[in-house]
Image (cartoon, grey):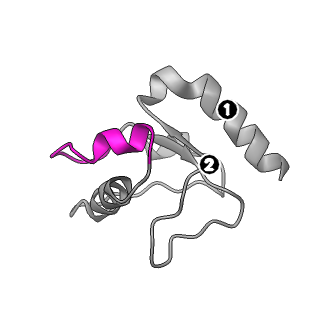
Amino acid sequence: MLYRLHDARAAQFWDRRLRVSQEIKAAARGGSRGPLAQVSSNDGPVWDVVAVYAKGARWDSAYPEHAFADRPVVLVMEEFRRHLQDALKN
């Protein structure tokens, strides 16, 4: 699936130890509301999630707050595209 990303701003990688999933779940349990909160109670990895972050957002010591996140991806692409276009305008 790596061949589907054709934008230098996008990143995709393999997380064998599921550390990214664990951080997303911890952030969701810590107060994030919405679709990502649904994944915090799941025992498996976080997957099939699409998210948009504010320009300049960085994941340094804490998972950044998203401007938009939802799942499953196939059902939310139209809304994702709207949020992405808004984010790119700023």
Dot label at residue 67? 2
Magenta residues (range): 33-46
- Residue at x 41% of width, y 28% of height: 72
Pointer 2 local density, CA inside 10 Å: few below 14, some 14–19, many at least 20: some
- Closer to the camera in the image, 26 or 60: 26
At x 30% / y 46%, what residue is drawn? Answer: 46
What residue is drawn where x is 20% and y is 42%?
42
Figure quadrant of residue 20: bottom left
59 vs 24, left or right, is right
Residue type highlighted by circle 2: Ala
User: Which residue reaches farthest right?
Assistant: 89
Q: Does the magenta segment cover residue 41?
A: yes
Could you say which disc has been placed on residue 81 in the image?
Answer: 1
Horizontal and vertical percent position of residue 44: 18, 45
Quadrant location, the N terminus: top left
Tell me the tag on residue 35: none
| Residue 87 located within the stretch drawn in magenta | no
* Horizontal side, residue 25 vs residue 56: left or right: left
